[in-house]
Image: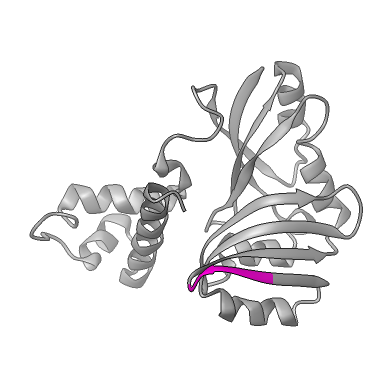
Amino acid sequence: MKRVRITLDPAGDYAPPLYRRFAGGAPSLDRVHIINWNVAAPPTAFLLRLRGDYRRFEAELEASENADEYEILPITDRECHCFLEGEVADAARLLFENFTRGSLITVPPIVCNDDGTNTFSIIGTDADIQNAVEGVPDGVGVTVEAVGGETVAPKSAVGRLSERQLEAVEAALEIGYYGVPREATTADVADELDCATATAAEHLQKAESKLIGALLER
């Protein structure tokens, strides 16, 4: 058996409107994990774990044409489970099914990244994993992040960060942003990343939220 961690970059019908909200398109959410799912037949159902202003996001669910049913199950003021049922394009459902064929098992959670991608681990035989990776449609980018390892789930909290968030944290460390006393500002980090100060601040805030959550196992 083999363990592989991959990142998918879906577009078009492979990225339904609600998914785009989960993967960086909803400013009210800091983190979205897909904990479980049932895509065997319409309607499609998901169990999500949301972190952020989920009450504000609930209004978006209420107005969404793609969410037939949903229920918010609070954990804290800033974190909840969300059961969601709705219609998705056949393309999106088939993309999920691509990673359930043969011996394959998808290991939750599927992490929805801020850049529109999602990252998860699969376990299966070499042949089934190879077929799944090769079976990803042309409209979906696929990156193999890691192969093998001592554990099923990623060991490092850094694995929760998007590429841009990791770049922001690394730049901040390099120039002393996290020094005591602090030797750099958010504007300095923005200069290193060649982006707006507000963008750098957002990258750092979301990265810090994910890292602290990982340390506290949340």
Q: Main secondary structure of the magenta part?
A: strand
The magenta segment is: 72-77
Choose top left, top right, bottom left or bottom right for residue 137.
Answer: top right
Does 158 sit left or right of 104 as displayed?
left
Does 114 sit left or right of 98 as displayed?
left
Q: Which residue occupies the extreme right position in the image?
A: 41
- Asked if residue 76 is among those painted magenta in the image, a careful observer would answer yes
Does 160 sit left or right of 169 as displayed?
right
Residue 156 picture location, percent across and down: 41, 37
Q: Is residue 16 above or below residue 98?
A: below
Does 204 sit left or right of 25 as displayed?
left
Between 67 and 19, the one nearer to me in the picture: 67
Residue 164 picture location, percent across and down: 42, 52
Residue 9 picture location, percent across and down: 64, 48
- Asked if residue 201 is among those painted magenta in the image, a careful observer would answer no
The reply to whether residue 67 is visible in this rendering is: no
* Rendered residue at 74%/82% (across/down): 63
Residue 97 picture location, percent across and down: 82, 41
Quadrant of the rendering where the N terminus is positioned? top right
* Rendered residue at 77%/44% (across/down): 96
* Rendered residue at 54%/35% (across/down): 153
Q: Is residue 102 above or below residue 49?
A: above
Q: How is the image coloured?
A: one colour
Between 41 and 136, the one nearer to me in the picture: 41
The reply to whether residue 181 is visible in this rendering is: yes
Choose top left, top right, bottom left or bottom right for residue 206.
Answer: bottom left
